Image: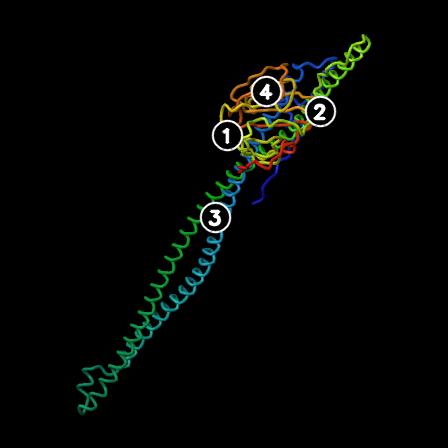
Amino acid sequence: MRKRVVRFGVVLAMSVALSYGISLNKPTLNAKADVTEADINEAKTKSENVKKEIEDTKQKLAELKSKASDMQTVVDEIDKQIGIISNEIYNLDQALLVKEGEISTTEAKLLQAKEDEAKQYADMKLRIQYMYETGQTTYLEAFLTSSDIGELLNQTEYIKNIADYDKKMMDKLVATKNLIADTDARLKQEKEDLELLKATQEESKAAAEALLAAKQEELDKINSDAEQMASLNARLEKEQAEADRLIDELIAKKAAEEEAKRKAEEARRLAEGGGTSTSTDYDIALTNLRWPLPSSCNKITELFGPRIHPVTKVASYHYAVDVSASTGTPIYAAEDGEVLIAEKHWSYGNYVLLYHDSHVSTLYAHGSRILVSPGQHVNKGDVIMLVGSTGQSTGPHLHYEIRVDGTRVDPLKYYDTSNFLYYLD
């Protein structure tokens, strides 16, 4: 059975986006001179909203593909049954043709038998009439005219033989006619049975074809919805990339502003004859990052890279490592830095984003309780949050991200993992 593929144009994709309340406009960098924490928070909120839409569309797309696969199985099975019924109908047609041929032959034989019976009966009547008209000997005449017993026996035997022959011929012809008539009746009954069976099979075929048409229509609708959802997902992923680009630009601009302020402050102090200032840009060394959990929490449950999302069951990319820990376990700042975001999110749950310097930021998610506020300075090793299982999570753990120059990288690159344990699905 050929499956139809429906193509969707730009107008349809735009209407889908609008129905989801999604803007297809690219985000742009604010032209203000200074980048505030509110700017970055707003950009991240927009980015996370789009991520949610992407996860939703991916999940719906996976569900549609699963439905399409199940429906295709149903369609194929119905199509197979129609093929079997059609073959049975063909075989019944062939059997009917054979039966009709047998009936035709039998009826011809029956007609011939009736003609033979009629002819034999006519011949017998002529013979009796001839014997009567010519005065041939009867049993009484044979008795009166015979000179002795031998002659009598000869004449009566002759008469008996003629009568026996006529009777046997008539009995044989009648028996043959009856046999042929019975065969003809049986063949006609068998033909009626075949025709009834064919009619039943044709009804079954018609019902199956009607069901097939309905299921094919459902399959076409599912395929249509799946293509529509795939088109929407592609547009959302493009918008997500733009949102991430905006976040990178905001962080870079903030870093540039802080660097400019530092240099200006340094120049002012030098002009006033003072010493050098302490930089607000922490200039961290990635190889000296603190492990964000107690050293005993070394069980890795999800690596950085491709995966099947444990909640949505959709293929995605994991831009972090997940570390198992009990609820309430302290989460430490990996380095000195400034709290950019400390809030609750639909996917991250309670999370904290730390800005360390113009190159590095770290993110900690799914906490049970946040202990810091946006704009707050934290030192390396400060407790910023407690482990939990908020947001899209299947159990208490820490979701740990590192972003270098705007790109999320594998956190395990910067730690000694020789004592780590891996519990991966």
169 is higher (above) or lower (below) than 75: below
Q: Pointer 4 and pointer 1: residues touching (CB < 8 Å)?
A: no
Near-viewer residue (77 or 256): 256
Q: How far apart are the two marked residues, 2 and 3, measured between alpha carbons?
A: 65 Å
Q: Is residue 270 visible?
A: yes
| Residue hosting label 2 | 359
Q: Pointer 1 and pointer 2: residues touching (CB < 8 Å)?
A: no
At label 1, counting other C-alpha atoms closer than 10 Å, the crowd grade (few under 14, some 14-19, many 20 or more) is: few
Near-viewer residue (70 or 415): 415
Mark 3 or mark 4: which comes first in sequence? 3
| Picture disc at residue 81 | 3
Q: Residue at x 66, y 15 (%)?
A: 37
Viewer-nearest of labels 4 and 1?
Answer: 4
Please state the horizontal and vertical placement of residue 148, each as a whole percent of the image.
17, 92
Q: Quadrant of the N terminus?
A: top right
Horizontally, is 281 left or right of 333 in the view? right
Q: Pointer 3 and pointer 4: residues touching (CB < 8 Å)?
A: no
Q: Quadrant of residue 269?
A: top right
Q: Quadrant of residue 114?
A: bottom left
77 is higher (above) or lower (below) than 40: below
Tell me which amino acid carries mark 1: Thr
Secondary structure of residue under mark 3: helix
Tell me which amino acid carries mark 3: Gln
| Picture disc at residue 382 | 4
Q: How many badges with numbers are in the image?
A: 4
